[in-house]
Image (cartoon, rainbow, N blue to C red):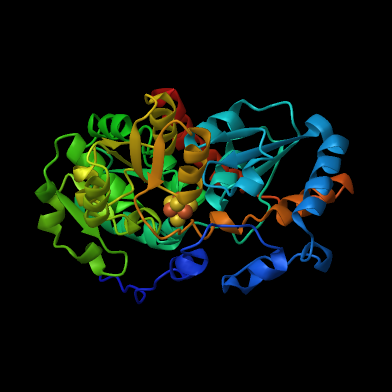
Amino acid sequence: MTTVFKRPAVVPITELEQSAFCTTETLRTKTLEEEFRAGVRWQKVPIRYLKLSPEEIDEGIAAAREALQKQVVVLGHHYQRPDVIKYADFRGDSYKLSQMAARERDSKFIVFCGVHFMAETADILTAPDQVVILPNLAAGCSMADMAQTEDVEESWNELSSVLGGPEEVLPVTYMNSTAAIKALCGRNGGIVCTSSNATKLMDWAFERSQRILFIPDQHLGRNTGLKLGIPLEDMVVWSPFEPLGGHTPDRLRRARIILWEGHCSVHTRFSVKQIEEARTRYPDVSILVHPECTMDVVQQADHVGSTEYIAKMVREAPAGSKWAIGTEINLVNRLAEENPDKTVFCLDPIVCPCATMYRVHPAYLLWVLEGLMAGLVINRIKIEDDVAGEARIALNRMLEIAG
Ligand code: SF4
């Protein structure tokens, strides 16, 4: 076997920037100029957008929507701040929004208030004459940044040379990954999954192969594997910075799930200590967490599920019930507001939004909409045809199997 030289381990900048907006106070949208002081990378915008007040932005967006009518549809991920989600025609998690993007054929322009990989997926699933726009190109995802395409391709080649073809190992990527990684899954018999359907799709993969390479969230992969009855000793964590991920060929052959060493910087903030504190405060509280949380948190929770599942659980819960939630703060705050007859709060006492989602400030939304009014497409997300074609295979497999 040839020796593979790995690049030094690096922490993505998005991970280092994650705590930029954390506060002990209530989150409040400020002017873009003030928010630029947060110390994260922002996309540059024309100066006039920096000082706009919420009222001016509101008026501008209303005027743009009036002028553009059905030419534009605005999609909003549940983790967007309230001052952005209020403009969304449709809200959802990445799975629901990808289904919507696949069905939406009436609007030429799809403005995706979310993060980069979501807009990429929307571009892959929409018709060729539709245009997908991401209001701020700096809105990435720290988890997706932990799986650089070149590292995944190199790792896949290493793994395949040791383990063999698709009957020995299949790639399964979480939606939170680049289009090129989805394409790698498409051309190697693999699939894309989301947190709503990971169990079903991992099961599908095991019907076809002995092993799975699960990219990039080790926690979702581990929690899902355990749910399917796969013991921990049959899972290994693959470091992209070490030859063979840090394992011997024999250890890899004994594994059923090879977990990419990635995580969500937001969901790994939740801890068992926070769960114990919530239960001390309210003995009858229900703990509801996202499967991107660590295994110990998931095992201590009463309910585990995707963002859509969390929203549905709270919405359908009886009045008077109490919910301590382990997911992004903007969604938790919205659920608390929309369910005043229940007690809904975040497990983490520090208010810590997803710092990349939070970069979609309403002034960016106004900027791209005013661009369209002027006949200018700003921040188009366009995936090359060959990559899109292979990624679509993996995405369509998911949509066909999971519905
Ligand atoms: S919440 Fe986590 S996985 Fe989702 S966009 Fe933010 S960093 Fe990425």
The residue closer to the viewer here, 333 or 386, is 333
Quick one: 74 or 176, which is closer to the camera? 74
- In depth, the one of 75 and 53 nearer the eye is 53
| Left or right: where 88 falls relative to 353 | right
Q: Residue 331, position in %: x, y? A: 49, 43
Q: Relative to residue 381, is residue 341 drawn left or right? A: left
Residue 225, position as x, y percentages in the image:
21, 40
Total numbered badges shown on the rendered structure: 0
Give the residue drawn at x 61%, y 25%: 103
Q: Specify the quadrant that holds the N terminus.
A: bottom left
**Image quadrant in which the C terminus is located:** top left
Which of 23/164 is in front?
Answer: 23
Q: Who's the residue at 18% across and 40% down the image?
A: 226
Q: Position of residue 132 (x, y in %)?
A: 68, 43
Identity of the residue furthest to the bottom in this view: 8
Can residue 92 be seen in this snapshot?
Answer: yes
Up the image or down, 78 lies above or below 148; here it is: above
Task: Tell me if I can see residue 193 in this picture.
Answer: no
Residue 146 is left or right of residue 166, and the answer is right
Q: Residue at x 56, y 51 (%)?
A: 115
Residue beneath the point at 58% across and 35% down? 91
Q: Is the residue 31 above or below the residue 282 in the image?
A: below
Residue 245: x and y in percent read 24, 63
